[in-house]
C-alpha cells in the first residue's frame, strides 16, 4: 500500500501541474511559440493521470483492509462485554464505515490538489493582469462559503445515514438469530415492521445528503458561469485596448476554468464528508479500552481456581454478581446451581476470563488470570458452551487439532466418519444438529488440554442417554482436572464434589449435594419450581442422604 500511496501523492500533483501549465504553453503557441509544448505537457499529464487513476482505488482498498483489521482486532481483544455494540452495528461499521474512512487519502489528495491548482491559476491570471485576478476573486468568497456549507450539511446527513444503517443491521441480525421463535409465534409481520421501522429515517438522511449535493451542484454551476463570464469579459476588454496579446486571452480562459475547478469538486468534497463520518464512527470503537496483554507464565500446579472478592455490575452500577469468594480445589468438580438469573453463566464467564470483574481477582494456581499470556490462558482454562461456534473453513480447522481420542471421548467420531470429505469437509456444507455441534465443541475443548474446564450447559442439546455416555467419557478424559459445571439437572449436581449454590448473584452455600439436598429451598431450586417455606416438608433425620429429586427438563 505504501508504494501506491507514494504513487498517488506524486502522480496527482504532477497531473495537476501539467494541467496548470497547459494554458500558458498554449498561449505561447498562439503567439508564435513552440507548437510541441502543448503536446509534451498533455503527454505528461496523461501518464500521471493513468497512474493516479490506478493508485487511488488501490490506496483506498489498502486503507480499508488495514482499518478493518484494526477494528476487528480491537473488538476481539475487548471480548464479550455486556455493554458492547450489537453485532449488526459492528458489522455495519466494519463493512461500511471502514470503506468510507479508507477513501480519506485519495479524496483529500484530490481536494487539496484542486485547491493548489486553483491558487496557481489565480496566480497565472494575476501575472497576466491584476484586473483578471480581481474579476476572479469576486466569486471566491461565495464559493468558499458554498463549500463550507456543503461539508457541514453532508457530514451531518451522512453520519445520520450510517447510524440508522447500523441500527437497521442490528435489528436484522437479531431477527435472524431468533428466526425460529418468530416463525413459531407467527410474528413475522410484526417483526418485519420492527426491523424496517428505521427505514423512513434512513430515507430522510439519504434525501438530505442528495439535497445537499443537488443544491451545491446548481449553485456551483451558476457561480462558475458568472465568474468565467466576468474573467473573459475583462480579458476581452483588455485585449481590445491592447493590454493583452491573443495568446494571453487563451491562457486567461484556461486558467479561469482551472481556478474554478475547486468549486466543481463536489464528488471529492462528498468523499471527504463520507471519510470523516466513517472515521468518527471507527474512532468511537478504536478508542475503547482493551485489557493490557498478560506477560506471566502459568506455574506448576493442580489447576486450583480461586475467585476473591469478585463483583460484577451492570452499566448503571447495579450489582449482578457478588461480592463473592469461591475456590474450586485443583482436580475437583464444582457444580454451579441456582435459579434462572442467579448468575451461574456470569460466574462461569468471570472464572475463565471471558468477563473481567469490576472488582476482585480470579486466580489460577495463585496467578491472576488477567496477567497470563494468551497462550498460557488457553493452557489454564478451557470452555465448552451450550451453542459452540465452529471457527475455520473446514471441520479439521474447527476442531483445532482434536484427534481420534478427543472425538471418541465426545462421541463425535460416529457422525464425523460419515462426512463426505472427512476433516476436509467445509463448514458451510455441514448440516448438524445442536447436539452434534455440542460434541464437536467438547472435542475441541479436550484437544486444548487445559488445567481447568468450564462447562456452561455444554450437554443440554443431548438426549438423556447420549448425555450420560458423553458425561461418563468426559469424566474419564478430564480426570485430574479442575471442573466448573453450570448445572441445570440434579444429576450434574449429584456427581460433583461440591455444589456452589447461587442466589441473586451471591454464594448462598458451598457444600456437597448430599448436604444441601436437606434444604427445601435447594430442592426447589433443582426442581425448577418455587416452594413455600412455610409448607415445605421437613425430611426426617437419616444417616443416608435423601433421594435425589427426579430430573426435569431444563427451562
Image (spheres, grey):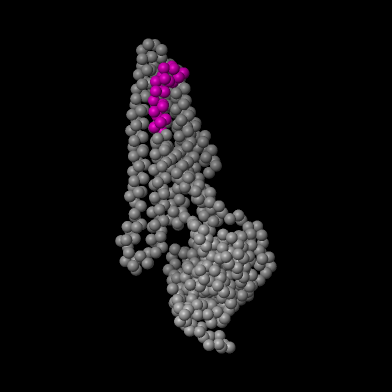
Of residues 515 and 409, the one drawn nearer to the viewer in this rendering: 515
The reply to whether residue 255 is in sight is yes
Q: Position of residue 400 (x, y in %)?
A: 55, 65
Magenta stretch, residue numbers: 125-147
The C terminus, quarter of image: bottom left
Position above or below: 107 against 388:
above
Q: Which residue lies furthest to the right in this view?
A: 300
State the image coordinates of residue 15 (x, y, percent, origin top left).
47, 31
Q: Is residue 72 above or below residue 57?
A: below
Image position of 78 with respect to 55: above or below: below
Depth order, front residue of 255/442: 442
Q: Residue at x 61, y 75 (%)?
A: 332
The image shows residue 160 at horizontal and vertical percentages of 40, 46
Residue 55 visible, this angle: no
In the drawing, does residue 227 fall left or right of residue 400? Answer: left
Which residue is farthest top?
241
Q: Name the foreground residue: 539 vs 501.
A: 539
Task: Provide residue 383's location: percent of width, then percent of height.
Answer: 55, 67
Residue under the image location 52 percent in, 48 percent down: 66
Is 194 on the left-hand or right-hand side of 425? left
Displayed quadrant of residue 325: bottom right
Q: Is residue 133 magenta?
A: yes
Q: Name the residue located 66 percent from the left edge and 63 percent from the top edge.
A: 367
In the rendered image, the residue lying farthest to the front is: 534
Residue 276, magenta (yes or no): no
Magenta span: predominant SS is: helix
Q: Residue at x 40, y 53 (%)?
A: 167
> Camera-side residue: 398 or 311?
311
Query: How many labels sit on residues?
Result: 0
Amino acid at each position: 500500500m505504501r508504494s501506491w500511496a507514494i504513487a498517488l501523492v506524486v502522480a496527482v500533483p504532477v497531473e495537476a501541474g501539467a494541467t496548470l501549465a497547459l494554458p500558458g504553453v498554449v498561449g505561447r503557441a498562439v503567439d508564435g511559440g513552440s507548437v510541441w509544448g502543448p503536446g509534451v505537457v498533455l503527454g505528461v499529464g496523461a501518464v500521471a493521470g493513468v497512474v493516479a487513476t490506478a493508485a487511488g482505488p488501490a490506496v483506498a482498498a489498502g486503507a480499508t483492509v488495514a482499518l478493518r483489521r484494526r477494528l476487528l482486532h480491537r473488538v476481539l481483544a475487548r471480548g464479550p462485554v455486556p455493554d458492547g455494540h450489537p453485532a449488526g452495528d459492528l458489522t455495519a461499521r466494519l463493512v461500511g464505515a471502514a470503506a468510507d474512512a479508507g477513501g480519506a487519502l485519495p479524496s483529500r489528495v484530490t481536494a487539496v490538489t484542486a485547491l493548489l491548482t486553483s491558487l496557481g491559476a489565480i496566480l497565472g491570471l494575476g501575472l497576466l493582469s491584476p484586473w483578471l485576478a480581481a474579476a476572479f476573486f469576486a466569486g471566491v468568497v461565495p464559493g468558499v462559503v458554498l463549500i463550507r456549507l456543503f461539508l457541514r450539511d453532508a457530514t451531518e446527513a451522512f453520519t445520520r445515514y450510517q447510524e440508522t444503517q447500523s441500527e437497521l443491521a442490528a435489528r436484522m441480525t437479531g431477527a435472524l438469530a431468533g428466526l425460529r421463535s418468530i416463525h413459531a409465534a407467527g410474528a413475522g409481520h410484526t417483526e418485519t415492521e420492527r426491523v424496517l421501522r428505521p427505514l423512513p429515517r434512513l430515507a430522510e438522511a439519504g434525501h438530505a445528503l442528495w439535497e445537499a449535493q443537488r443544491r451545491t451542484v446548481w449553485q456551483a454551476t451558476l457561480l462558475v458561469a458568472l465568474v468565467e463570464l466576468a474573467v473573459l469579459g475583462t480579458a476581452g476588454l483588455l485585449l481590445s485596448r491592447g493590454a493583452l496579446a491573443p495568446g494571453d486571452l487563451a491562457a486567461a480562459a484556461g486558467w479561469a476554468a482551472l481556478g474554478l475547478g475547486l468549486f466543481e469538486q463536489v464528488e471529492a468534497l462528498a468523499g471527504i464528508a463520507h471519510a470523516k463520518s466513517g472515521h468518527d464512527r471507527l474512532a468511537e470503537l478504536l478508542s475503547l479500552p482493551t485489557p493490557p496483554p498478560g506477560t506471566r507464565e502459568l506455574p506448576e500446579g493442580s489447576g486450583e481456581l480461586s475467585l476473591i472478592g469478585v463483583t460484577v455490575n451492570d452499566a448503571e452500577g447495579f450489582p449482578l454478581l457478588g461480592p463473592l469468594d469461591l475456590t474450586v480445589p485443583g482436580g475437583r468438580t464444582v457444580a454451579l446451581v441456582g435459579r434462572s438469573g442467579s448468575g451461574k453463566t456470569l460466574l462461569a464467564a468471570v472464572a475463565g476470563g471471558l468477563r473481567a470483574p469490576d472488582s476482585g481477582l480470579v486466580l489460577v494456581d495463585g496467578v491472576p488470570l488477567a496477567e497470563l499470556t494468551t497462550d498460557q490462558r488457553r493452557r489454564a482454562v478451557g470452555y465448552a458452551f451450550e451453542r459452540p461456534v465452529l471457527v475455520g473453513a473446514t471441520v479439521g480447522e474447527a476442531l483445532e487439532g482434536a484427534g481420534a481420542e478427543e472425538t471418541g471421548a465426545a462421541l463425535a467420531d460416529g457422525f464425523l466418519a460419515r462426512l463426505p470429505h472427512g476433516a476436509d469437509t467445509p463448514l458451510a456444507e455441514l448440516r448438524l444438529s445442536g447436539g452434534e455441534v455440542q460434541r464437536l465443541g467438547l472435542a475441541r475443548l479436550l484437544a486444548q488440554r487445559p488445567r481447568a474446564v468450564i462447562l456452561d450447559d455444554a450437554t443440554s442439546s443431548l438426549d438423556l442417554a447420549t448425555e450420560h455416555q458423553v458425561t461418563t467419557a468426559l469424566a474419564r478424559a478430564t480426570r485430574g482436572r479442575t471442573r466448573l459445571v453450570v448445572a441445570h439437572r440434579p444429576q450434574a449436581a449429584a456427581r460433583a464434589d461440591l455444589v456452589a449454590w447461587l442466589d441473586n448473584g451471591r454464594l448462598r452455600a458451598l457444600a456437597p449435594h448430599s448436604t444441601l439436598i436437606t434444604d427445601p429451598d435447594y430442592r426447589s431450586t433443582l426442581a425448577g419450581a418455587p416452594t413455600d417455606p412455610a409448607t415445605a416438608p421437613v425430611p426426617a433425620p437419616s444417616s443416608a442422604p435423601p433421594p435425589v429429586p427426579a430430573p426435569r427438563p431444563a427451562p
